[in-house]
Image (cartoon, grey):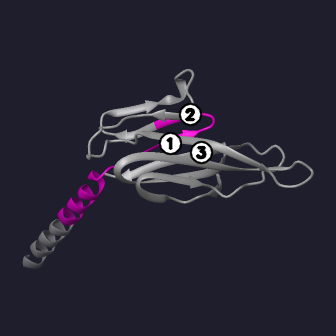
Amino acid sequence: MKKGICRLVLVLVVVLSVGQISVHATSRSTVFGGWSESKGYYINDVPGYYTDYADIPDIKSEISVCGTGTGTPADKPESHTGKRLSRVIDNSGDIEEAAYGKTKWANKYHYTTARMELSDGTVKTTSGRQWGWNETEATSPYYYRALFENTEARSYWGSQS
């Protein structure tokens, strides 16, 4: 009987400990957003805030999302730019393409990632996360797409809260 109670107490301690660890780990949120050619700009996971910029008319290639004007970092970047780069690779006129992203976020350690992806989200090339303070830039490796392959340039930003 004592062994059964000891096991039960041990199991409860382990379960409660693991539960507290997982609650603590999930309570730390990640702020992120980005840009894609087909959907435009967006911001996710800012407490109480979600915006999809795809439906805003006359949006340009850069959008200003916020700024505090002080030494305290804002919840989200001041701006994020995304675009497709292209270059001619030979005399036949063949073109290869890359994605480019730039994020300005004063007083905040953050990243920018640029990727060439298929429309279903399959990644073809990526810059990886380029981490830094205040301003980060990322350019994916150039990609030569196959005939009828539907690629998109996409860029992403994020930071640990």
Question: Marks 1 and 2, how far apart in space?
Answer: 8 Å
In percent of the image, x 15 and y 74: which residue is there? 7
Q: Which is nearer the eye, 9 or 44?
A: 44
Q: Do the CB atoms of the residues marked 1 and 3 lie less than 8 Å apart?
A: yes
Vertical placement of residue 107 versus 55, above or below: below
Label 3: which residue? 154
Which span is picked out in magenta?
15-42
Q: Which circle's residue, 1 or 3, is located before the other in the chain? A: 1
Using the rendered image of the protein, determine whether residue 108 is visible from the camera's viewpoint. yes
Q: Kindly tell me whether residue 31 is visible in this rendering.
A: no
Label for residue 40? 2
The correct choice, above or below, for 66 with respect to 71 in the image is above
Q: Secondary structure at mark 1?
A: strand
Q: Is residue 144 left or right of residue 107?
A: right
Q: Quadrant of residue 11?
A: bottom left
State the residue in front, 56 or 133.
Answer: 133
Residue drawn at point x = 47 percent, y = 48 percent: 157
Tell me the kind of residue under disc 2.
Gly
Report x, y in % for residue 65.
Answer: 41, 34
What residue appears at the point 24 percent right and 55 percent down from the top-left corner? 23
Residue type at the position of mark 3: Arg
Residue at 43%, 31% in the rendered image: 51
Which structural element holds mark 2?
A: strand
Crowd rating for badge 2 (residues with CA inside 10 Å; few <14, some 14–19, many 20+): some
Q: Is residue 66 left or right of residue 5?
A: right
Residue lying furthest bottom: 3
Of pointers 1 and 2, the one earlier in the residue sequence: 1
Q: Position of residue 89 (x, y in %)?
A: 83, 55
- In this rendering, the answer to whether 130 lies above or below 55 is below
Quadrant, the N terminus:
bottom left
